[in-house]
Amino acid sequence: MVAVAPEVLGAFVLTAGALVLSPGPDTALILRYTLASGRAVGLATVAGVQLGLLVHTALAVLGVSLLIASSPALFKAVAILGALYLAWLGIGGLRGRGGLDIGGGRSVGGFAAARDAMLTNVLNPKVIVLFVALFPNFVVAGRGDTTAQLLTLAAVLIDVNIVWQTALAVAAEQARAWLTTPRVALVVGRATGLVLLAFAVVMIVEHVA
């Protein structure tokens, strides 16, 4: 038996697509690292985001996500850690020449990009809310194993994520040819730094203040 009914799966794909297309810290990080270090590092960043979603999936199945979401103190702690991490990444983009010295300056490797993307995703309270508040709306109590349904929905979310974010990284790679001048690289580096700082502020305002 299929874990999730086709009509429920279709509705979830549309919902997941809308969520994935909305800009967030993951998008900013993918663009930043692709522009700074090329397609391979950009795709490593995409992979890091999916690792973060796998962590959230495991936490949801084990009930940890619900525990965090139901505890104001734990939820705020995650939000603060996530905001601090985003702020640290954003400040890195503002320091020196902005961290986007395309063509021979500061860049990151695939491992560092994947690590940053994974931590950014894991420490994003909105993703916790996504798994705790959204997924149950697509789980049918009388249809098979609940865990199997959750895993199916998570796999669909990751698939949609991979399609969109891979296309984003490839498109950003095509734009690197225009971003070879130091001045443009400086502007892009600082702009992405400011965007990450803005997400950090929004995270604090929405989930802590």
Image (cartoon, rainbow, N blue to C red):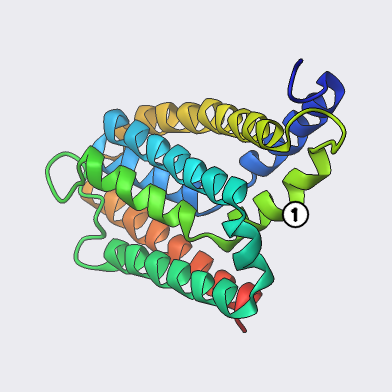
Q: Position of residue 136 (x, y in %)?
A: 78, 46
- Quadrant in which the C terminus appears: bottom right
Could you tell whether 66 is left or right of 104 in the image? right
Q: Position of residue 191 (x, y in %)?
A: 41, 59
Q: Is residue 106 visible?
A: yes
Residue positioned most to the left: 104
Q: Position of residue 118 (x, y in %)?
A: 40, 48
Q: Which residue is mark 1?
A: 133
Query: Quadrant of the rendered structure where residue 15 is?
Result: top right
Residue positioned most to the bottom: 209
Q: Is residue 23 visible?
A: no
Residue nearest the observer in this picture, 146 or 154: 146
Residue nearest the observer in this picture, 129 or 114: 129
Q: Residue at x 28, y 29 (%)?
A: 40
Where 77 falls versus 172 (above or below)?
A: below
Q: Secondary structure at mark 1?
A: helix
Residue nearest the observer in this picture, 125 or 27: 125
User: Badge 1: how crowded within 10 Å, few (<14), some, or many (20+)?
Assistant: few
Q: Residue at x 46, y 66 (%)?
A: 82
Query: Quadrant of the rendered structure where residue 179 is?
Result: top left
Residue type, mark 1 in image: Ala
